[in-house]
Image: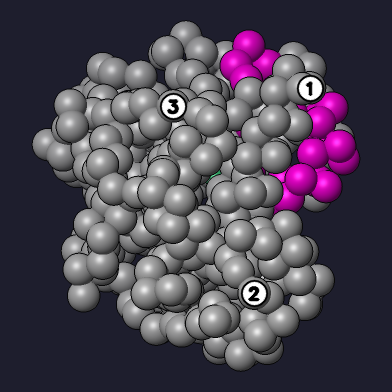
């Protein structure tokens, strides 16, 4: 008996259009992966924000190249994931979807959770809610949405020409904890440092990706002087990136679609801790499938930014819930989801 793989393209619909660097989207493509063994199904998800270079087409091409006949059981996780990683370079989202489905399958077969499998508690943790970049009035509206949804922590996307005005307007309605994601948008070191001091005074907890992902010397300059932790997102995708960026940031944002899945995400968290770096667990625009998978590692993070399912209207899975601002994973083995459609 061998492992069988199937997949389905799907479009997630956003509650609000998502705007990053001038691009506005009302939906985002994903691929749902199913791995079956002995009548048990494991689910995974690949999400492909268009600016990262993968698409439904590239993921399908990647998946069509997988031959699982050479493996007798899903428990050969090391050789399976090694095989997948070596199949083609990059394709991180495609690899992540496979890794998530494999973890779901293995843990269901073992009647345990992903958190247990990695010996970490599945504890309820607060997640931030991301306010996408937009006109200041629209960002205030989204902040009010976050409050109505019950989120207790905000993450504000900046990097536009009116960051100061945006922050001022948002802080007129928001009193809780918040962090900033500059999305590579800041241009000069000195003005960035001034703004970080202002953010510190206003109570911000960290600043993510202030400068272009390749400009490590600017990040290193800011990290040396910043009163707030400076976190790498676009500058750090996989385990092998950490050594290169470690002296330029205080911490990393680990995301499944960058790390190629749960196993390497777990290794990245361990490596960051060894280096006394801070850890954020984050997500792309994702359904409950990938986000619930990552929520199994929430207790390992300093800050959790897993709001994907709360930004979409047609989640194909039942998974993590928000209760009193905290993420709660259903008591289901595997990654913690059930398929709805
Ligand atoms: Mg980011």
Report, in whole angstroms, how far the alpha carbon at label 2 lies from the one at label 1: 38 Å
Range of magenta residues: 226-250
Dividing the picture into quadrants, the one containing residue 38 is: bottom left
* Residue to which mark 3 is pinned: 121
* Residue to which mark 1 is pinned: 275
Q: State ligand 1's quadrant.
A: top right
On the rendered image, what quadrant is the C terminus found in? bottom left
Query: In percent of the image, x 73 and y 18: which residue is there?
Result: 276
Magenta stretch encompasses residue 7: no
Is residue 261 something one can see in this rendering?
Answer: yes
Residue 164: percent from left, percent from top: 44, 30
Report, in whole angstroms, how far the alpha carbon at label 3 lies from the one at label 2: 31 Å
On the rendered image, what quadrant is the N terminus found in? bottom right
154 to the left or right of 198: left
Q: Earlier in the sequence, mark 3 or mark 2?
A: 2
Q: Is residue 22 above or below residue 57?
A: above
């Amino acid at each position: 008996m061998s492992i069988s793989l199937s997949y389905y393209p799907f479009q997630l619909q956003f509650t609000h259009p998502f705007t990053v660097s001038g691009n506005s989207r009302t939906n985002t493509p994903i691929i749902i992966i199913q791995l079956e063994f002995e009548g048990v199904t494991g689910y995974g998800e690949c999400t492909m924000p268009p600016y990262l270079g993968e698409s439904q087409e590239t993921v399908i091409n990647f998946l069509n190249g997988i031959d699982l006949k050479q493996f007798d059981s899903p428990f050969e996780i090391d050789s399976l994931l090694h095989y997948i990683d070596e199949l083609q370079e990059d394709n991180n989202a495609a690899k992540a979807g496979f890794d998530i489905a494999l973890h779901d399958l293995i843990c269901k077969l073992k009647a345990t959770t992903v958190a247990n499998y990695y010996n970490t508690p599945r504890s309820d943790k607060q997640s931030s809610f991301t306010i996408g970049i937009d006109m200041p009035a629209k960002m205030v509206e989204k902040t009010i949405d976050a409050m109505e949804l019950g989120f207790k922590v905000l993450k504000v996307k900046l990097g536009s020409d009116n960051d100061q005005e945006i922050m001022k307007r948002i802080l007129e309605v928001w009193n809780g904890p918040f962090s900033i994601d500059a999305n590579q948008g800041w241009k000069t070191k000195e003005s960035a440092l001034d703004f970080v001091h202002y953010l510190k005074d206003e109570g911000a907890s960290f600043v993510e990706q202030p400068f272009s992902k390749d400009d490590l010397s600017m990040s290193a300059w800011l990290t040396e002087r910043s009163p707030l932790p400076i976190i790498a997102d676009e500058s750090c995708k996989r385990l092998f990136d950490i050594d290169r960026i470690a002296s330029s940031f205080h911490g990393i944002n680990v995301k499944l679609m960058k790390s190629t899945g749960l196993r390497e995400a777990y290794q990245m968290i361990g490596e960051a801790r060894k280096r006394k770096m801070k850890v954020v667990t984050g997500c792309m625009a994702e359904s409950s499938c990938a986000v619930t998978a990552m929520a199994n590692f929430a207790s390992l993070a300093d800050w959790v930014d897993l709001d994907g399912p709360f930004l979409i209207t047609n989640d194909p899975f039942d998974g993590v819930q928000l209760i009193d601002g905290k993420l709660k994973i259903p008591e289901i083995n595997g990654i913690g989801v059930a398929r709805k459609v």
